[in-house]
Amino acid sequence: MDYLKTIVPSQFLAERGSNLVVINPGSANIRIGLARQDAPLNVPHCIARRTTGANQFPKKNVLDQGLNSQVTTAQHMEREKAYDIIASLLKIPFLDEEVTNNAFPRKMGRIDVYPPQTNKKETAFSWTDVYEKTIPSSASVAEFYFDVTEDPLRNDQNDESSVEKEGHDYRENNSSEPRYRECIFGEEALRISPTEPYCLRRPIRRGHLNISQYYPMQQVLEDLHVIWDWILTEKLHIPLSERTMFSAILVLPETFDNREVKEMLSIVLRDLHFSSAVVHQEGLAAAFGNGMSTACIINLGAQVTSVICVEDGAVLPTTQMTLRYGGEDISRCLLWTQRHHQTWPPVRTDALTKPVDLLMLNRLRESHCSIREGELETVAVVHSYEDGMPPGSHKTRLTALNVPPMGLFYPMLLVPDVYPPPPRTWFKDYDDMLEDTWHTEGFFPSGASAFPMWESYPIFQARPKKEDNIGLAEAITKSILSTGRIDLQRKLFCSMQLIGGVALIDGLIPAMEERVLHAIPPNEAIDTVEVLQSRTNPTFVAWKGGAILGVLDFSRDAWIHREDWIRSGIHIGSGRKYKDSYFLQAQAMCYINS
């Protein structure tokens, strides 16, 4: 402890984090990097595999496109009703109301000058070169398939294909027929033309492994393995032969079930050859990443929004709320809003079957959407990506840009996609990764375990119910009030933390505070709500917290070693079972506050 008080935190992270890899997987992106780094790689969590016409008819560009349902008439009516409620709050015309009939004063905001826009935001995405490159025979196999000279800290979303960077096509030097790349990863996988023989696969969807009749379990797990292995080898430059010198910290969302956690541990220890690994919950890691011991963590992800409370460095499991909507739903709502107002150019934009269109919509949402009163319009460049054609540019007026992000509070506006439920029997697993089952075999002769590590909660506490159809303000209020203690409730309402990429939406914090305050029942003695500013980029704060927890874990009692996992896995009462490392709270908070 004396050493912790004297050392500079950055020096400590550099010394102890050089052989720790922090992995924070999500539905849309995976954040991964060495614990000593200031920021992780942020890579689209997907893989495009080459297909042939013989085994796929009709052709699918995206594996999940057949699972998406159409918007029903009832949903469409609910969406229009939600729009008008939001319009009343924002003091803008109703959905089908002419501006001339608007009773509210007309206020215009030009977001193309607030915040300032750069030429980079207007640049079209280029189609990925799907052919292998012919290079001199002296080059390595890794360089043959991928550009490995990139800075490992560089965000994969900014990568361009090496063909474009070199300024010429290597196929010109190859007299033989060009060969397709078998697998393409990250943003390159999202920029593949629909005319090419590839199918995009996302192994995680809506906070769970993407298991369905179209996507068997073994394929999901194999894709996870291949994606993570590619990032480790080609981006972090840690080949398989050297990974036994590294340990892994898995920072996992609370949405994952027990067996999903175990399968990912198996990938890390068995397939990727890490010497040891530990699992931390994303909410807990986010609290540590912001130097907080008690907080309500609101994780605004691409496909899932979740809420969970942390008290004195320990997660309160009964406070967990999971909402099946996120940033991608806001982006699709932005497209619907423009089409309804007839401001979208007459091009075929399809976020479900053309991933590059979703990339474009996400970028427009990040650049232009904001929450504030008055009519919000801008002139922006919209790009069209037609099959086999160069991207087209269309200068257009976008309107009602403050409406889509308000869908977080009125989710019927977003109309999240409806998927067939996954095979839940596959997830039935009584060996809870986040519960201590030592000395409890007598209570569960069948082998089931339910004794939580949190001593202040009932011994047979059931899993918290997940809510899908309520707004974010109501979910936060329910989560905090479920703690049942007025002193803790007041503290949590004044210690809300927004994490995830959607947390960067301009104007979200004051809107959140206002909506949560109004959602608190009048009989509750709470009159103050505050969202605390994040100390680091909200997109990476959970990853950063995982790095801090990893370097502070001197004893490593909760870590699982590769040999033990492969030989025995987890056995009830074995003494080697994983348990959440909340015992680190004392030394971790001492370090953070020093």
Image (cartoon, rainbow, N blue to C red):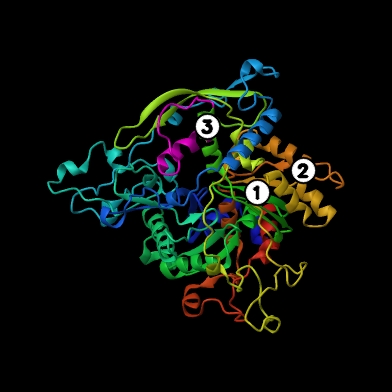
Give the extent of the magenta segment.
341-365
CA gap between label 2 and label 3 equals 29 Å
Residue in the picture at 54% in, 50% down: 418
Q: Amino acid at mark 3?
A: Ser
Query: Disc 3 versus disc 1: distance between alpha carbons?
Result: 27 Å
Residue flagged by tag 1: what amino acid is it?
Asn
Q: Residues within 10 Å of mark 1 (few under 14, many from 20)?
A: some
> Dot 2, how many residues are within 10 Å of its Cα: few (below 14), some (14-19), or many (20+)?
some
Residue 143 seen in render: yes
Residues under numbered marks 2 and 1 in contact, where contact means CB atoms less than 8 Å apart:
no
Find out whether residue 377 is within the magenta segment: no
Q: Check disc 2 and report its element: helix, strand or loop.
A: helix
Callout 3: few (<14), some (14-19), or many (20+) C-alpha neighbours within 10 Å? many
Q: Earlier in the sequence, mark 2 or mark 3?
A: 3
Q: Residue at x 59, y 27 (%)?
A: 400
Label 2 with label 3: CB-CB less than 8 Å: no
Q: Nearer the viewer, mark 3 or mark 1?
A: 1
Q: Which residue is mark 3?
A: 367
245 sits left or right of 505 in the view: left
Q: Is residue 520 left or right of residue 197?
A: right
Residue 356 among those drawn in magenta: yes
* Location of residue 406 in the rendering, given as x and y in whole percent from the top left corner: 64, 36
Task: Give the quadrant of residue 113.
Answer: top right
Q: Which residue in the protein does label 1 denote?
A: 469
Going from N to C along the chain, the mark reached first, 2 or 1, is 1
| Residue 133 x/y as whole percent | 23, 47
In front: label 2 or label 1: 1
How far apart in space, not on screen, are marks 2 and 1 (Cα)? 15 Å
What residue did someone put label 2 on? 519
Give the percent coordinates (x, y) of residue 167: 26, 36
